[in-house]
Image (cartoon, rainbow, N blue to C red):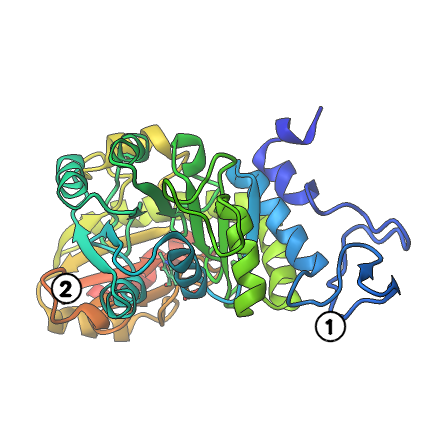
Amino acid sequence: MSETEYGPATTAIHVGQEPDPITGAVLPSPVLATTFVMDEPGIPRAGYDYSRSGNPTRDLFGQTLAALEHGERGFALPSGLAAEDLLLRVLTRPGDSAVFSADVYGGTFRLFTQVFAAEGRTARPVGAGLAQIKEALEEIRPAVLWLETPSNPQLDIIDIAQAAQAAHQVGALLVVDNTFASPALQQPLTLGADVVVHSTTKSIGGHSDLVGGAIVTAAHARLPKGRTGVSGSKSIAEEVAYWQNATGCVASPQDAWLASRGLKTLAVRVQQANASALKIAQALKELPGVKQVIYPGLPEHRGHETAKKQMSGFGAVVAFRVDSPKAARAICKRTKLFALAVSLGSVESLIEQPASMTHATKADDETAIPEDLIRLAVGLEDVEDLIADLKQAIG
Ligand SMILES: Cc1ncc(COP(=O)(O)O)c(C=O)c1O
C-alpha cells in the first residue's frame, strides 16, 4: 500500500513522521538548531542552511498536513492570521480585490477590511448563498474568493465545489479557511479549491498550547493569470516558500512539532467532539430560553444537506441564541466546565459571546454578530457533564 492510499488516521501518524534513521526513535524529534553546517561554502549538507529559510520539523509538519488535505505542499506559519496575511500578499497586488465570506472570524474580517484595504486593495463581504457569491464574482471579478465553511461563528455552509467552479469562471482563485472542519472532516482541495489555510491553534494543535497557522496548496495552484511572483515563479507554493524566507514569516520548530503531534490524534478527537456536539445541540433545543440552535448536523440547518455532501462530520462548534444579550452574558459567566474564553478545537470546552469577544471588531458593521448569540467549542469531557453544565447555566 502506498502513502497516497492510507486513510487519514494512518496518514497523520506515518506520513512525514518516519522513525529517526540514526537513533531509531519512533518519531522525529524537533530540530531546534538555528543553523546547519556546510561541507563546502554555500553547499548545505542536507539542504538546510538556516532555520528561517528552512527547518526539517516545519517541513515534516507541512508534508503531513499536505497529505491529509490532498495538497501538494504544506507550510507552517506563526499564526492563522499570519498565514492569511502572507497568502493574501502572495495572491494579490495593489488594485486587486477580494470577495470574502461575510461570516468570517473577526480577525479575518479586520484583515480584509482594514489592513488589506489600507494597501490599495478592496474587499467585499458576501453571504453564504451561491447566488449571492456568483453575483459578487460577476460584478467584482476579484483575484480571490475567500470562504469559511463552516463559518465562524454562525456556521454557514457553502458548497465548495460549486463555489470553485463559479470562482474559476471569472478567473478568481478559491481559498478556503478549513479551520472549523479540519482535514479530518473536509478536504477543500479535492473539491476544486486552490489553497487551504488553517489556524493550527485550533483543532490541529488541539490542546490550547500553541499559536500557529498553515497554508496548503493544490498541485495545480498558480498565481492569477498573467502574473509572475517576486520569486520569478508562477507557482503559488514556490511563491509562498519564497515569501516565508524573505519576510521571516515562519512557525518555530517547537510549534510545528506540537502541531505534528496534534495531527496524530486529530481524527479521534474530532470524531469524539462531533458526537458530543450533536448531543449538545439536540439537548439545547429542549431548554427554555434557547430561541435557536445552530449546528450543521441538525436536519433543520440551512446547510445540512451540503454539509452532508462535503463533510464527513459536522464539527465541534455549536451556536445558539437566547432571549437577550443580557441573558447571553449571564449564561457565559455561569458555566463551570465550559471556560469563558475565545478559541476552539481543544480538549477543554469553551463558551463565549462572539459579539463582545472574537467578533468585537465587526461590532459596528452590518455583518455584526447578534449579541444574544453564544458560541460553544465542544471539547472531550464526558458529554453528560457538559450538558448538565449548560442546563444549570441556562436555568
Ligand atoms: C476560522 C478562523 N480562521 C483563522 C483564525 C486566526 O487564527 P490565529 O488566532 O491562529 O491567528 C481563527 C481564530 O480564531 C479562526 O477561528
The structure residue drawn at horizontal position 16% and vertical position 62%, both measured from the top left corner, is: 369
Quarter of the image containing the C terminus? bottom left
Q: Nearer the viewer, residue 214 or 325?
A: 214
Depicted 341 relative to depicted 289: above or below = below
Describe residue 76's horizontal placement relative to residue 133 as left or right. right
Percent position (x, y) of residue 112? 27, 62
Which amino acid type is shown beneath numbered disc 1?
A: Thr
**Residue 325, located in which quarter of the rendered image?**
bottom left
Tag 1 residue:
34
Q: Residues within 10 Å of mark 1 (few under 14, many from 20)?
A: few
Residue 64 in view: yes
Tag 2 residue:
368
Percent position (x, y) of residue 155? 26, 49
The structure residue drawn at horizontal position 50% and vertical position 68%, both measured from the top left corner, is: 211
Depicted 281 relative to depicted 186: above or below = below
Image region (quadrant) for ligand 1? bottom left
Which amino acid type is shown beneath numbered disc 2?
A: Ala
Describe residue 377's horizontal placement relative to residue 139 as left or right. right
Q: Earlier in the sequence, mark 2 or mark 1?
A: 1
Percent position (x, y) of residue 134? 17, 36
Depicted 77 relative to depicted 279: above or below = below
Q: Residues within 10 Å of mark 2 (few under 14, many from 20)?
A: some
Q: Nearer the viewer, residue 209 or 253?
A: 253
